[in-house]
Image (cartoon, helix red, strand yellow):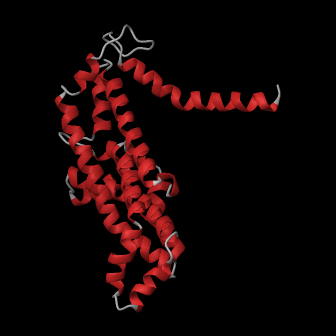
Amino acid sequence: MTPRLFTPLVLTAVLLFLIGPFFIIVAASLSAGETLVFPPQGLSFRWIVKVFEVPSFRESFAMSMFLAIGGTFAALVLGVPAAYALSRYKLPFGETIRTIVSSPIIVPGIIVGLALLRYIVVPFGVGITAALFVAHTALVLPYAVRVVSASLNNLRSDMEEAAVLLGCSRLGAFFRVVLPNIRSGILAAFILGFVTSFNQVPVSLFLSGPGVRTLPIDMLSYMEITYDPSVAALSALLAFMSMAIVMLAERFLGFSRYV
């Protein structure tokens, strides 16, 4: 087999491996049958409609949105100043700080969830919602720091120095010069954090409790008692939502420049 033919075949095989499960889920969500099967048994949109009729899905979706938006916003409030300090100043143990900040990405989510449950939630009696909020903020924080740092590295520092020389305070220069110029990076960090938090499973699995569950955990619980295609329909809708968010971010923000 010639290299010119081998390369397209390998590329096609990789693409099928990556996106094949997505097409299977979409096809299964359109099945007219009563159980989750592939190939689908007929064609029907009733399972997509049912997704919006399940009360637990609506409640857990609201919780996931709260955690994704609130946790990402909190991570940015903490991460933007941290990224600025790491990018603009030679801090003692700067690389060590970067490693510690990035640890939620490096450490498996199951370990993070178990550690939070064992050493914070149980000993201090932290509520479920508060524990989930703190956990999601901690998980998103590394993305906020890394993406905003990349944006700051692309911003010339002499622009800020010029503002200071013209009479602006350091804080004023940060809000009037730095923030407007890294706005796209902050928005990209928010979108990446939102998608990461919304789809988080391992940590949420340990910290969820009675009456308080995120949507991915609720989907797992739903499949334990019901095996109809509504879970596939919800999975397809969430996949399309994530794809739409990322595509819009790439179209208007140049998302690939920051991640």
On screen, residue 144 versus residue 62, left or right, reads: right
Residue placed furthest toward the top? 42
- In the image, 176 versus 58, the foreground residue is 176
Residue 7 appears anywhere in the view: yes
Vertical position of residue 209 compared to residue 135: above or below: above
Q: Residue 11 appears at what percent x and percent y?
A: 66, 32
Image point 28% across, 37% down: which residue?
215
Residue placed furthest toward the right? 2
Image point 47% across, 49% down: which residue?
108
Residue 91 appears anywhere in the view: no
Vertical position of residue 73 compared to residue 91: above or below: above
Count of residue discs: 0
- In the image, 177 versus 140, the foreground residue is 177
Image point 55% across, 32% down: which residue?
18
On screen, residue 98 versus residue 197, left or right, reads: right
- In the image, 126 versus 65, the foreground residue is 65
Instruction: Give the quarter of the figure containing the N terminus.
Output: top right
Image point 32% across, 82% down: which residue?
172
- In the image, 176 versus 97, the foreground residue is 176
Vertical position of residue 247 compared to residue 146: above or below: above
Q: Residue 157 appears at what percent x and percent y?
A: 49, 79
Q: Residue 128 appears at what percent x and percent y?
A: 22, 50
Q: Residue 184 appears at what percent x and percent y?
A: 41, 60
